[in-house]
Amino acid sequence: MCISSHILRSNFINCTSTYTVFDATAGSQGGAIYVEGQCSVMNNNFFEKCIAYQGGAVYVSGGDAEISDSDFVSCYGNYEKLNKEYGSQGGAIYVSGDRAVM
């Protein structure tokens, strides 16, 4: 059985999820949206300037994801360690699940 979450016609602007070596408990996944273990439907959304280590705007883990008719503007992955920035995974979207449809 799959529990669903639906995110429709929403705006996400200047969303940040950060991880630094000084605060290992800080979130680092999904600058705007973090979904774990669900079926997710995201339709007609707008994401701008969203930042996280994995999935600058959206992070989905352990479930199915359907993302359609959505815009991602200036979203990126960022990892900072000792005030230096490093590459990361999933500039706008990171999916580690069973199935992704985009």
Image: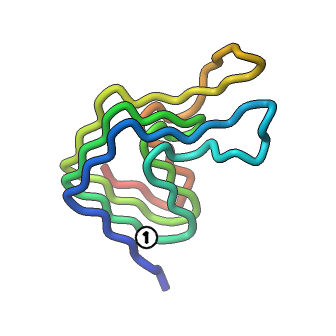
How many marks the image carries: the answer is 1
Q: List the residue tagged with mark 1.
A: 39
Question: What colour-coding does the image apply?
Answer: rainbow
Observer-nearest residue: 49 or 97?
49
Above or below, comparing residue 42 to residue 93 in the picture: below
With 44 as the anchor, is 100 left or right in this view?
right
Q: Residue at x 30, y 59 (%)?
A: 42
Residue 5 x %, y %: 38, 72
Above or below, comparing residue 88 to residue 99 in the picture: above
Q: Which residue is drawn at 52% across and 29% down?
A: 77
Residue 28 location, quadrant: top right
With 22 as the anchor, is 52 left or right in this view?
left
> As shown in the figure, which amino acid type bears the numbered disc 1?
Cys
Residue 70 x %, y %: 23, 46
Q: Which residue is drawn at 19% across and 58% down?
A: 9
Residue 23 x %, y %: 77, 39
**Tag 1 secondary structure:** strand
Above or below, comparing residue 14 to residue 34 in the picture: above
Residue 55 x %, y %: 50, 40
With 12 as the anchor, is 87 left or right in this view?
right
Q: Going by the picture, which residue comes out furthest to the top?
A: 84
Q: How crowded is mark 1: few (under 14 residues within 10 Å), some or many (20 or more)?
A: many
